[in-house]
């Protein structure tokens, strides 16, 4: 029985954490530190670096720090470019640290490199809550139960990593984050240097990764989104052309008109007229 107990994977720490003020966490690169850290973002946003690679973290993102790796967590207020205000901090996560032969071997063979998307997260959070309860339960020996829960959590992460495929690798994950951000903020003033800095990469890296993943430069993608928005408003609103251009994110009507004609082979006014809508 003693040897079986020694083989159990028991959490060093496991819990639920909420931050409403700035917070930093750090685990240095150390060849003698064999702890494995799992962190599941449940609410809010933060920024995490693993071995020098920085990830913007959103709800549903899971971070894996493997044995000996450097890890840094930064939770800080986020500037809302649309409203021009700093958003209050409200970050919630589930965390788990373990060591031991089983979980070290699991982490080393895991396909997750730094971060993986977990969707949906309810099942994983349910397992985490059960593990927290068992860790706090002081009545009886529940080591075997905790060992089983840790392993089910890890194997569930493997399933999510398999679904994500190569998207869990840093160089493939960042373009998808940039894409979601561009889609959300397409009608706002955007500069690639600020977008790249937000995701912890250079402008050239952001452009290279985005184009390699989606086949076009990031700002070209923004223009395409804006043109799609404008074309819908040309057909389904009575706004004048200048207002449509501005509301879609174009700061110059002549540029909007040229871009629209290049895409649709007609001017905005002709596009509207061909669909039976009078031009203001």
Image: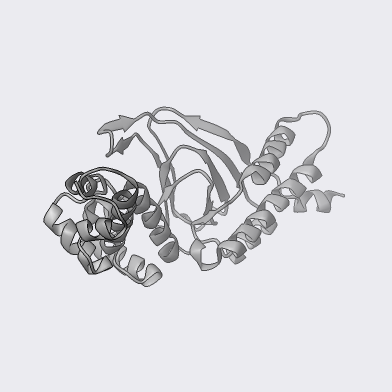
**Coloration mode:** one colour
Which quadrant holds residue 17? top right
Placement of 42 over or under 101, stated as above or below:
above
User: Residue 231, image x and y in percent?
Assistant: 31, 55
Residue 52 appears in view: no
User: Residue 145, image x and y in percent?
Assistant: 79, 43
Count of numbered badges drawn on the protein: 0
User: Residue 121, image x and y in percent?
Assistant: 61, 45
Rendered residue at 64%/62% (across/down): 105
User: Residue 2, image x and y in percent?
Assistant: 84, 49
Rendered residue at 55%/44% (across/down): 40
Front position in the image: 138 or 32: 138
- Check the image and name the residue furthest to the right: 1
Which quadrant holds residue 155? bottom right
Q: Is residue 8 left or right of residue 73?
A: right
Rendered residue at 22%/68% (across/down): 262
Front position in the image: 24 or 4: 24
Q: Is residue 259 left or right of residue 54?
A: left
Residue 191 appears in view: yes
Q: Is residue 60 left or right of residue 171?
A: right
């Amino acid at each position: 029985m003693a040897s079986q107990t020694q083989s159990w994977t028991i959490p060093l720490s496991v819990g639920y954490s909420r931050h409403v003020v700035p917070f930093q966490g750090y685990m240095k690169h150390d060849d003698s530190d064999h702890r494995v850290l799992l962190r599941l973002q449940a609410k809010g946003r933060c920024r995490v670096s693993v071995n020098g690679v920085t990830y913007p973290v959103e709800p549903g993102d899971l971070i894996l720090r493997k044995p000996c790796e450097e890890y840094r967590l930064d939770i800080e207020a986020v500037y809302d470019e649309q409203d021009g205000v700093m958003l209050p901090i409200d970050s919630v996560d589930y965390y788990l640290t373990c060591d031991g032969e089983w979980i070290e071997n699991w982490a080393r063979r895991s396909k997750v490199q730094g971060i993986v998307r977990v969707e949906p997260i309810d099942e994983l959070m349910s397992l985490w809550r059960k593990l927290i309860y068992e860790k706090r339960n002081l009545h009886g020996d529940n080591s075997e139960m905790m060992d089983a829960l840790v392993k089910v959590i890890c194997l569930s992460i493997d399933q999510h990593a398999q679904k994500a495929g190569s998207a869990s690798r840093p160089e493939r994950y960042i373009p998808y984050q940039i894409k979601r951000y561009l889609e959300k903020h397409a009608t706002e003033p955007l500069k690639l240097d600020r977008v790249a800095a937000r995701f912890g990469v250079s402008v050239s890296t952001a452009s290279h990764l985005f184009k390699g993943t989606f086949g076009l430069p990031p700002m070209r993608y923004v223009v395409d989104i804006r043109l799609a928005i404008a074309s819908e408003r040309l057909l389904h609103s009575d706004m004048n052309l200048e207002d449509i251009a501005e509301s879609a994110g174009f700061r110059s009507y002549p540029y909007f008109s040229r871009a629209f004609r290049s895409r649709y082979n007609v001017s905005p006014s002709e596009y509207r007229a061909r669909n039976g809508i009078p031009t203001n």
